[in-house]
Image (tube, helix red, strand yellow):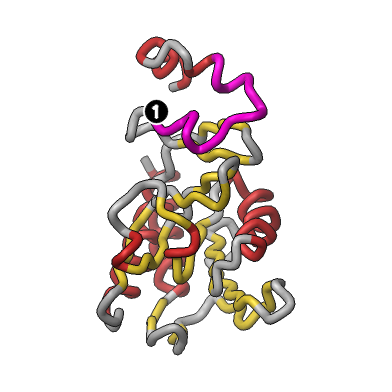
């Protein structure tokens, strides 16, 4: 993947070596290039597995059911946390007035969901929680498809600027704030296990 992109974008190899990049430095990269900017470092990631994308779609659809006016739900959305950090939450709620640009400014993000993937499990479990708290994203949920049963863990930003855990479950639940969102991790587990059986039987 990287080699092909290097051919199409001659300066990509140089960008990957740098540790002082800003959001402006990577603004010209192809839209279909999946990357994050982490403390001035350009990090490429592989395409997500179908299950990962499927869960993201289910979450986005659930978020849209009762969403209030003035908010749009977006998936795999670049978010500018500061001049040297651009992350891509799997699902975000964005205020309408901030939805006309990409990357979206973090001040226009109401909440974020991350789905853990094998290639980024340590980052998704720990690093992003700290980063999103520092950026003051008020609500953050982590979905773990790698657990024995797919789980959902929710966090709310406290007055001290730290996240406090509000829920951890692998069963259906309804989130009440910032609006009612019904999610079903047990259905995600069933789907994951069916996919795994189909893969083994192929």
- Left or right of 117 in this view: 199: left
Q: Is 162 placed above or below 198 here? A: below
- Left or right of 79 in this view: 137: right
Residue 177 % position (x, y): 46, 86
Q: Residue at x 45, y 89 (%)?
A: 176
Q: Describe the element under mark 1 as helix, strand or loop.
A: loop
**Quadrant where the N terminus is found in the figure:** top left
Q: Is 191 placed above or below 195 here? A: below
Residue 6 at least partly seen: yes
Residue 23 drawn in magenta? yes
Name which quarter of the figure residue 20 lies in.
top right
Residue 119 at least partly seen: no
Q: Residue at x 49, y 49 (%)?
A: 80
Residue 67 % position (x, y): 30, 79
Q: Nearer the viewer, residue 159 or 151?
A: 159
Residue at numbered disc 1: 29
Q: Is 155 placed above or below 90 here? A: below
Residue 144 % position (x, y): 56, 61
Q: Nearer the viewer, residue 74 or 56?
A: 74
Q: Among all residues in the image, which is located at the extreme right?
A: 160
Report crowding for label 1: few under 14, some 14 to 19, many 20 or more residues within 10 A (C-alpha).
some
Q: What stretch of residues is rendered in magenta?
A: 14-27
Q: Residue at x 43, y 86 (%)?
A: 174
**Quadrant where the C terminus is found in the figure:** top left
Q: Residue at x 34, y 74 (%)?
A: 63
Name which quarter of the figure residue 71 lies in.
bottom left
Q: Nearer the viewer, residue 178 or 200?
A: 178
Residue 10 % position (x, y): 43, 11
- Left or right of 138 in this view: 78: left
């Amino acid at each position: 993947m990287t080699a092909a992109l290097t051919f199409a974008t001659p300066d990509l190899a140089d960008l990957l070596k740098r540790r002082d990049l800003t959001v402006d430095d990577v603004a010209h990269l192809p839209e279909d290039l999946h990357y994050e900017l982490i403390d001035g470092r350009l990090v490429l990631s592989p395409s997500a597995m179908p299950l990962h994308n499927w869960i993201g779609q289910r979450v986005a659809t659930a978020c849209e059911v009762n969403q209030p006016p003035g908010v749009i739900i977006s998936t795999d959305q670049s978010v500018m946390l500061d001049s040297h950090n651009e992350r891509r939450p799997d699902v975000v709620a964005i205020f309408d007035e901030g939805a006309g640009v990409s990357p979206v400014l973090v001040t226009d993000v109401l909440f974020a969901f991350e789905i853990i993937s094998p290639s980024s499990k340590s980052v998704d479990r720990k690093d992003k929680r700290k980063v999103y708290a520092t950026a003051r994203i008020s609500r953050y949920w982590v979905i773990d498809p790698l657990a024995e049963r797919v789980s959902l863990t929710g966090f709310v930003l406290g007055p001290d600027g730290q996240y406090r855990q509000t829920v951890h479950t692998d069963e259906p639940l309804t989130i009440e704030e910032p609006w009612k969102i019904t999610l079903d991790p047990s259905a995600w587990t069933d789907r994951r296990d069916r996919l795994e059986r189909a893969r083994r039987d192929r």
